[in-house]
Amino acid sequence: MATYTCGDCSMSVKDLTCGTCGSELIYAEVGENSVGVSQCPNDHGKIKSPMCCGSDMSVE
Ligand SMILES: [Zn+2]
Ligand SMILES: [Zn+2]
């Protein structure tokens, strides 16, 4: 299970899932700037990773 955590505070977000198939979203980095996204393993799309304190939350 992927848990997103903020480096600046203790905020964490857990278990993002795809609304279409219910699969857990997989963390990935895309593009030249390695933007963190969460994508469906079944290609239903992707969303920007959660943000907190002005920066992307990361997956440990
Ligand atoms: Zn934070
Ligand atoms: Zn899906």
Image: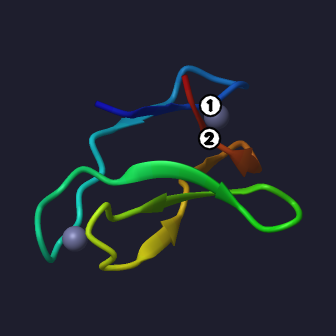
Side (left or right) of 22 relative to 4: left
Q: Is mark 1 within 8 Å of ligand 1?
A: yes
Secondary element under disc 1, as helix, strand or loop, is loop
Residue drawn where x is 72% and y is 42% of the image: 53
Residue drawn where x is 77% and y is 50% of the image: 54
Name the foreground residue: 46 vs 43.
43
CB of mark 2 within 8 Å of CB of mark 1? yes
* Amino acid type, label 1: Cys
Quarter holding residue 29: bottom right
Q: Is mark 2 within 8 Å of ligand 1?
A: yes
**x and y percent of residue 22 in the render?**
11, 61
**x and y percent of residue 39 in the render?**
42, 63
Label 2 sits on residue = 57
**In the image, is residue 55 above or below residue 33?**
above
Q: Residues within 10 Å of mark 1 (few under 14, many from 20)?
A: some
Side (left or right) of 23 relative to 48: left
* Amino acid type, label 2: Met
**In the image, is residue 23 above or below residue 18?**
above
Secondary element under disc 2, as helix, strand or loop, is loop
**In the image, is residue 22 above or below residue 8?**
below
Name the foreground residue: 8 vs 45.
45
